Amino acid sequence: MGRLVPAVTRALDILELFLDGDGTLSAPEVTRKLNLPRTTVHELLTTLAARSYLVPAPEQPGRYRLGVRTYQLGSRYAEQLDLAAEGLRVAREVAETCDETVHVAILEDTDVIYIAKVDSTHAVRMVSAAGRRLPAHCTSVGKMLLASLPEHELDHRITGRRLAAMTPNSLTDPDELRTALARIRERGIATEHQESNPDVSCVAAPVRDSAGRVVAALSISVPMIRWNEQREDELAELAAKGAEDLSASLGHRGGGR
């Protein structure tokens, strides 16, 4: 385990003080409660206020309350909780319609993490699990999420990195991946043909939050013995509908960025 940074620890101690009482504190109160030097408290309060984690309390000179940045962090955490629960609900509905395996995943750096999964009832089905992590460029959900990133952020995540192959069909050349992502942006649907599993193909669609940001992707995975072009078109439409339903449950009302 790495070393704790004292300044960060003290700043977090200050923020946690606001969980109690009436939600406002003065510098002397913080100094007394945490037994810190007055100069240190002043510097920490000034820094937290400059970053909008604290703001002056209205009509209470010398007192602070929590700022908008803490609300934004809490809201994002709540969104993730809602996303997992709602993702599982929608995945069940989509799986009942197509009787194939449905996933909901989020992007973390260059990997995807599956936060919801519902299996098909077929004897031949995809072996996977919620919580599993896979290289984003090898999956339909991952390519959908990578395609939704701003160009500079995509560059940061893939430039100079080795793109590992999971199967002979995996995209390992960054330029080829960029070309594939451009097509995904145009179509609004991502596909994966035996790129993470030699026996499976998938389609995926983007899930948006209330601000229109792509925060997840919903996919339908099908063993190759049940895959064909007509099936791909049908499932792409169903994945898009499922992703729209999940987006709506997160507060999205159409449009995006």
Image (cartoon, rainbow, N blue to C red):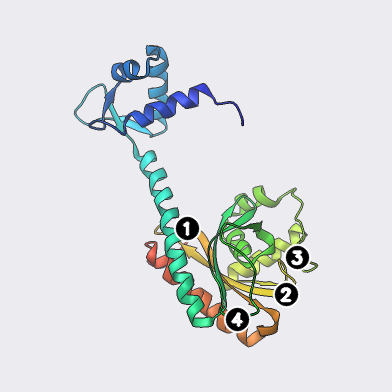
Query: Which residue is the site of mark 1?
Result: 213
- Residue 37 quadrant: top left
Q: Earlier in the sequence, mark 3 or mark 1?
A: 3
Tell me the quadrant of the picture where the N terminus can be found: top right
Q: Extreme front residue here?
A: 123
- Contact (CB < 8 A) between labels 4 and 2? no
Q: CA distance from mark 2 to mark 1?
A: 32 Å
SS for dot 2: loop
> Which residue is labeled 4 in the image?
122
**Where on the picture, by quarter, is residue 121?**
bottom right
**Residue 124 or residue 135, whichever sits in front:** 124
Q: Secondary structure at mark 3?
A: loop
Answer left or right for 36 relative to 61. Answer: right
Which numbered disc covers residue 170? 3
Identify the amino acid type marked 2.
Asp
Query: Which residue was labeled with disc 2?
Result: 199
Q: Earlier in the sequence, mark 2 or mark 1?
A: 2
Q: Amino acid at mark 3?
A: Ser
First in sequence: mark 3 or mark 4? Answer: 4
Name above or below for residue 51 compared with residue 244.
above
Q: Position of residue 218 (x, y in %)?
A: 53, 68
**Who's the residue at 51% across and 22% down the image?**
6
Identify which amino acid the numbered label 1 is placed on. Arg
